[in-house]
Image (cartoon, rainbow, N blue to C red):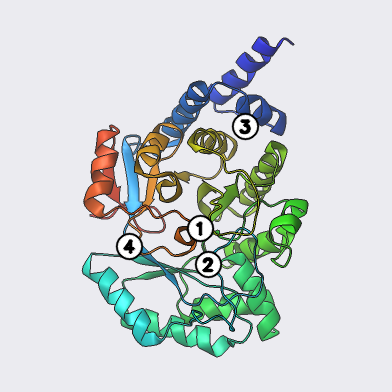
Amino acid sequence: MSTSLLADSVADKVLAGERITRDDALELYRFPLNELGELAHRRRLATSPQGRERIVTYIVDRNINYTNVCNVYCKFCAFYRTEKDHDHYVLTLEQLDQKLDELTAIGGVQILLQGGHHPKLGIGHYLTMLAHIRAKYPHINIHGFSPPEFQHFAEVFKMPLREVIVKFMEAGLGSIPGGGGEILVDPVRERIAPLKCKSDAWLEVMRVAHGLGLNSSCTMMFGHVETIEDRIEHLQRLRDTQDETGGFTAFICWTFQPEHTKLRAEPVGSSEYLRMQALSRIFLDNIPNVQSSWVTQGPRIGQIALRYGANDFGSVMMEENVVSSAGTSFRLNTAQIERLIGEAGFEAHRRDNWYRLLS
């Protein structure tokens, strides 16, 4: 088959709503950016629930990093500290309350609660923190602890993974973020984060959580040492897991931010971000929501991404520490998000973690 006929065949599959293969994905990756974006946008519109085709959602939440102490030393991270560093910390309950009071004042409904892999905090610390937040702020969903954190907990607490997750749920955990996924290809993980959990272990957390009725998001951080084939392998593993569990609510991808990190890689630009977001929307046909990553790309690219497969504008994110440590510091408030969504030709709606529309 000629190159042009092959491209036409793959495009026809996308427009017909058919599932694409890895080879199809490689072919789509080579499409002109505007053509790939149009295919992703049409796939997004075709799979939107009836009446929500013109709606773009966002959530009012806050990132809270309960500690910056971490013993996995990822090469792409500029946020972590050791206990020997003068600026290491573990937040107190009083400090958490101040952040949650500020979030409540602007109508927030969720926190993204993540931290480093602290080698000394016991399970009592985490259960107390969760129970305190749940009791004092019942209106706030705790979207907390990435899969590598849970694998770390199981090791430090000397408990089965499932038991750890159950205890966290009983204490107030409402959902799990997809952090720490990076690229789910072990040779890549060995190069960028050799002490972090491997791909199967990351996916194991998600399978166990989904089996317990706990939803999660999933992510990809790309543009460092991985190949295009590695990115597609990552997407394949997410799609296969979603076929099994149905527990992923959304997919978010972003590009490696190099400033102040130890990882030496040439950063990719916004066009590569848009290309991968569009390809992800088409490939991940069983994950309903794709989030625009304006935090790393900036508000204008985040706005353009709404025509490249995204149906969600992410979060107001009144606090963000990890990506900003690597040199990115974009911030938006509710009014700015709604204006950007409206200017792009869509209707802005607030949502909760499960993509239910809020009044």
For the C terminus, the quadrant is: bottom left
Secondary structure, mark 3, is loop
- Please give the count of numbered marks on the rendered protein: 4
Amino acid tagged 1? Ala
Q: Nearer the viewer, mark 1 or mark 3?
A: 1
In the rendered structure, find residue 145 and report the number of the disc placed on it: none
Neighbor class of circle 3 (other Cα within 10 Å; few <14, some 14-19, many 20+) is few
In this rendering, would 74 be left or right of 91? right
What residue did someone put label 3 on? 19
Q: Which of marks 3 and 2 is in front?
A: 2
What residue did someone put label 1 on? 326
Secondary structure, mark 4, is loop
What residue did someone put label 2 on? 79
In this rendering, would 66 be left or right of 76? left
What residue did someone put label 4 on? 318
Based on the displayed image, in which of its 4 quarters is residue 342 positioned? top left
Q: Distance between the residues labelled 3 and 2?
A: 38 Å
Between 336 and 166, the residue placed more toward the observer is: 336
In terms of sequence position, does the residue under pointer 3 or pointer 4 come before the other?
Answer: 3
Amino acid tagged 2? Phe
User: Is any atom of residue 138 visible in this view?
Assistant: no
Amino acid tagged 3? Arg
Residue at the location (54% across, 35% down)?
Answer: 272
Residue at the location (58% across, 22% down)?
Answer: 31
